[in-house]
Amino acid sequence: MKLSVIIPSYKDPYLHKTIDDLLAKSELGDQLEIIAVLDGYWTEVIQDPRVRIVHLGRNRGMRGAINAGVSVARGEFLMRVDEHQMFGQGYDKILTESCQPNWIMTARRYFLDPVKWEVMKDKGYVDYMDLKITGGKFSGVTRPGDDLQPIQESRAMQGSMWVMPHQWWKDVIGELQTEGYGPLIQDSHEMVFKAWKKGGKLMVNKNTWHAHKHRSFKRTHNNGTKENPANCEDGYKYAIEVRGDYFKELQKKWRI
């Protein structure tokens, strides 16, 4: 198996369209598996040999659902996506062929109108992101990228879509931590900090793209769920407490 795509899902009406799009745009054939993690709920999912279902008997939150998906993944590479996304043709082949052993890789990000199921071209796109502490939390801030670099190093990512070697997850990430962070937030920053400490890189591949649901459309887990609420402010504070000193070291390295 070349690639395992993990979708943490909680009652989102666009899960089915996301799976359909992943299947339609794939160029890996039977070397692709899609793992939909139904986080404490049930829905019917397309019958396809490339699609697997993990049903969690109770709601664990996004972090726990991703961990559950990774635990059963068989792919040489892991890919995490949200349940409301569209993808470029051949995304899976492009990303797995270019991702290096110590990389976390994302792709050019557009904005999706999930009702029309089309890219909102008037909103532009995001490539490079800088990492800042704003509003008491780690945030990715959009900055102009280098158009001459089709694959460029970045300092932050949204976190809705990434690819990495499965072995890199095992060696460096281990699992997404829920203690302190809570069930929902700051997962992308946690992974990237861990990767940097081990000499890894965060890269953005502009040779392919994904489109993520625009924030003007309702989310299903913005503050956790009724079963598993997220205290986001405590999670943001915890992230700065455990990563803040290292971030200051990085800022000196980056000469910020």
Image (spheres, grey):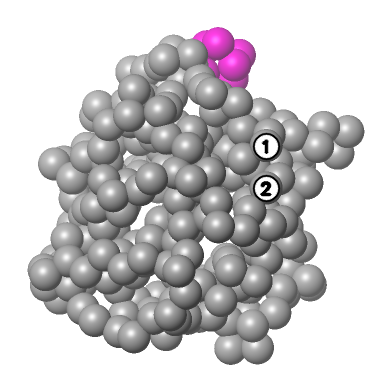
Q: Where is residue 156, by image quadrant? A: top right
Let me know if residue 174 is in the magenta part: no
Please name the residue that numbered disc 2 is placed on: 93
How many angstroms separate mark 2 from mark 1 (CA)? 6 Å
Task: Give the left or right position of residue 125, taking residue 15 as reference.
Answer: right
- Secondary structure found at label 1: helix
Q: Where is residue 211, by image quadrant? A: bottom right
Quarter holding the C terminus? top right
Residue 120 rendering spot, x and y as whole percentages:
72, 74
Residue 132 rendering spot, x and y as whole percentages:
50, 36
What secondary structure prevails in the magenta region?
helix
Q: Residue at x 41, y 56 (%)?
A: 6
Task: Give the left or right position of residue 50, taking residue 57 as reference.
Answer: right
Q: Would you say residue 237 is visible in this rendering?
A: no
Relative to 210, residue 9 above or below: below
Q: Amino acid at mark 2?
A: Lys
Relative to 149, residue 110 above or below: below
The reply to whether dot 2 and dot 1 touch (C-beta < 8 Å) is yes
Q: Which mark is residue 249?
A: none
Q: Which mark is residue 97?
A: 1
Look at the image and give the residue range highlighted in magenta.
251-256
Badge 1 density bin: few <14, some 14–19, many ≥20, Cα 10 Å: few
Q: Nearer the viewer, residue 55 or 184?
A: 55
Task: Give the left or right position of residue 159, taking residue 20 as reference.
Answer: left
Residue 44 rendering spot, x and y as whole percentages:
34, 85
Relative to 134, residue 170 above or below: above
